[in-house]
Structures are given as structure tokens and as C-alpha cells.
């Protein structure tokens, strides 16, 4: 049991560092190619922060472990709302910008509903993958056009732009970071999936449960750190926008890309798992509208819901 646990921990560490290096290198390359920091933030940085989930799901799919690939997405979206948003609201009540309620949250709800309908059919084929990936392209284009019409102050709150120092990197360092980041991500994904499968077999539980719990929480650690720090710094828009963007990217990019690579078997997931993901997505809508904030009591409710769900899964 010790070796699988060590593989899991090492995988998480390598994925976290790999994603950070890949984001730095890719952001610097994009800036040198003439893209604006805003566009880099919407595309390169957004993809980079979802890289751990993507690598793990692709690796699991290639190895024939669709349950871990899909469970990683479902579990990450559940953890993003119930665990991360809940903890952030407990740290400091989160004020909600009205623009999030007008477009971003309804969009997240619609995408979650569509993805849930694909999953409940027991398989996600290449056609569904193409639909989801097409939605990702449309989402990126929409965000680029939208940010051009928003006040500059709000744009800086909603979009995580790259650090100014990355533009000063040499070409050799840029490519070194990109190669290092990719290598760490691949190695980390290999270790994490191997460790997760071994733990599932040793404990006699399904790979779907491992994907929804341990793997999903581990790959969501970057989002947890970002939202917690944002809440402490009173940057509620970043904390909330980080969760919404991550959930949308998980469904459109990770499910879309993995299904395009190889059709996914989703028969291991039932109405409870999908109901939890969709139910939480719907729940935060009235929470946000009520006083345009998520207060500590509501954060505690989200966190308690997550703990209860984990207990139900494991028991």
C-alpha cells in the first residue's frame, strides 16, 4: 500500500510543478509572438491551470481507465464548488459581480447539463467529444470578444494575466520551461494514474470512486490555492471566476479532448454522481443572487455537502 500512496503523492507534486512551468514558458512564448497579456490569460494560462486534469484524464483514457478520466472531471467540478468555493466563502464572504450572474453562471449550468446528458448515456463518443471541443473554441472566442467591452478594472479581476517578468525570458529558457513542464506533467500523470488504480484494487473500491475523490481533489489543488489566496486578499471576483472558468474548461476541454482521442465508457457513473455535480451547479445560482454574495453560512453548507457526499461514496 505504501508504494501506490507514494506514487500518488509524487504524481500530485510533479503535476503541480509541471503545470506552473508550462504556464510560464507558454505565456512567455505567446507574448514574444505578439499576443497581448489579456489573450494569453484567457487562453494559455487557462489551459495551463487545467493541464493536470487534462494529462491525468488522457493518460487514464489511453490506459483503458475511462472511469478515472471521467471521475476526475466530475469530482473536480464537485470539489471546485462544494470544497473550494465553500472554503473560500468561510475564509471571507464572497461578493458576486452581476456580470457573472448574467452570463458566466448560466453558461456553466448549460454546459454542465449538456455534458451530464452525454455521460448518462453510458458512453461519450468522438461525436460528443467534437461537440464539447467545439464549445471550448466558441467559449474562448466569446471571452476574448467580451473582455474587450468590459471595464479594464473588471477584466484584470476576472482574467489571470501572466506575470510581466515572463516577457523578459530568453528563447532558450522559454523552450526549456515548456519541455520541462511537459515532461513533469507526463511523469506526474503516469504516477498518479498508476497509484490510483493500485489503491482502488487494494481497497476493493471502483476506479470511478477513486477518480471522483482522491484524483479529483489532487488535480484541483491549484484551484484551491488560487481561490483561497484570492479570498484572503479580498479578491472575490478572482476566487469565483477561477471556479466557474475551471468547471467550464474541465467539461469542454478535458471531456472533449479525451473523447476525441478514445471513446469513453461512462457506465460506472449514476444519477447520484451527476446529480451532485449538476445540483451544486444549480445551487450556487440562488446563493449568488441572494444579496450578491456567498456568505460564511452558505460556504459552510457547501463544505458540509461535500463531506456528506464523500462519506456516502466511501461507506
Image: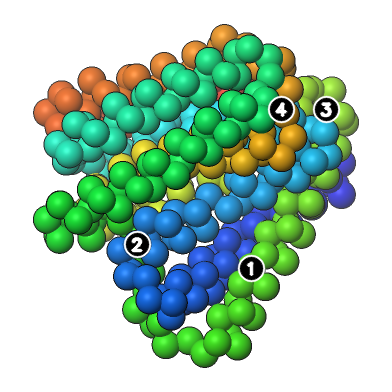
Mark 1 residue element: helix
At x 50%, y 54%, the residue is 47
The reply to whether the C-beta atoms of the residues labelled 3 and 1 are less than 8 Å apart is no
Q: Position of residue 6 (x, y in %)?
A: 79, 52
Few, some or many residues within 10 Å of mark 2 (<14, 14–19, 20+): many
In this view, the residue in front, 64 or 227, is: 64
Q: On the picture, is 134 further left or further right than 52?
A: left
At x 72%, y 29%, the residue is 263
**Between disc 2 and disc 1, whose residue precedes?**
2
From what the image shows, is residue 152 above or below residue 115?
below
Mark 3 residue element: helix
Mark 4 residue element: strand
Which residue is denoted by mark 4 in the rendering? 264
Which residue is denoted by mark 1 in the rendering? 181
Q: CA distance from mark 4 to mark 3?
A: 24 Å
**Between disc 2 and disc 4, whose residue precedes?**
2
Which residue is denoted by mark 2 in the rendering? 39
Q: CA distance from mark 2 to mark 1?
A: 21 Å
**Between disc 4 and disc 1, whose residue precedes?**
1
**Between disc 4 and disc 3, whose residue precedes?**
3
Which residue is denoted by mark 3 in the rendering? 203
Mark 2 residue element: helix
Q: CA distance from mark 3 to mark 1?
A: 32 Å
Does the rendering let one see residue 211?
Answer: no
Q: Position of residue 199 (x, y in %)?
A: 82, 36
Instruction: Indicate the quadrant where residue 96 lies.
Output: top left
Nearer the camera: disc 2 or disc 1: 2
Q: On the picture, is 175 further left or further right than 222?
A: right
At x 79%, y 51%, the residue is 190
Amino acid at each position: 500500500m505504501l508504494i501506490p500512496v507514494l506514487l500518488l503523492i509524487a504524481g500530485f507534486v510533479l503535476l503541480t510543478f509541471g503545470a506552473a512551468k508550462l504556464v510560464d514558458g507558454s505565456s512567455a512564448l505567446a507574448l514574444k509572438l505578439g499576443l497581448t497579456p489579456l489573450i494569453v490569460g484567457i487562453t494559455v494560462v487557462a489551459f495551463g491551470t487545467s493541464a493536470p486534469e487534462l494529462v491525468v484524464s488522457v493518460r487514464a483514457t489511453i490506459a483503458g481507465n475511462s472511469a478515472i478520466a471521467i471521475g476526475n472531471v466530475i469530482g473536480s467540478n464537485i470539489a471546485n464548488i462544494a470544497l473550494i468555493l465553500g472554503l473560500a466563502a468561510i475564509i471571507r464572504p464572497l461578493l458576486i459581480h452581476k456580470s457573472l450572474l448574467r452570463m458566466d453562471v448560466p453558461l456553466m449550468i448549460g454546459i454542465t447539463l449538456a455534458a451530464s446528458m452525454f455521460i448518462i448515456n453510458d458512453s461519450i463518443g468522438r461525436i460528443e467529444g467534437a461537440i464539447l471541443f467545439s464549445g471550448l473554441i466558441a467559449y474562448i472566442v466569446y471571452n476574448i470578444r467580451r473582455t474587450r467591452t468590459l471595464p479594464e478594472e473588471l477584466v484584470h479581476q476576472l482574467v489571470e494575466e501572466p506575470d510581466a517578468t515572463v516577457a523578459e525570458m530568453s528563447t532558450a529558457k522559454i523552450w526549456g520551461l515548456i519541455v520541462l513542464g511537459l515532461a513533469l506533467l507526463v511523469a506526474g500523470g503516469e504516477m498518479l494514474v498508476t497509484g490510483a488504480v493500485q489503491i482502488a484494487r487494494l481497497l476493493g473500491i471502483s476506479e470511478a470512486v477513486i477518480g471522483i475523490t482522491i484524483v479529483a481533489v489532487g488535480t484541483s489543488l491549484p484551484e484551491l490555492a488560487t481561490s483561497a489566496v484570492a479570498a484572503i486578499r479580498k479578491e472575490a471576483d478572482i476566487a469565483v471566476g477561477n471556479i466557474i472558468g475551471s468547471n467550464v474548461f474541465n467539461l469542454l476541454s478535458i471531456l472533449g479532448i479525451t473523447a476525441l482521442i478514445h471513446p469513453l465508457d461512462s457506465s460506472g457513473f449514476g444519477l447520484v454522481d451527476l446529480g451532485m455535480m449538476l445540483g451544486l451547479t444549480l445551487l450556487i445560482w440562488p446563493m449568488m443572487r441572494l444579496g450578491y454574495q456567498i456568505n460564511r453560512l452558505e460556504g459552510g453548507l457547501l463544505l458540509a455537502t461535500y463531506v456528506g457526499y464523500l462519506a456516502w461514496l466511501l461507506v
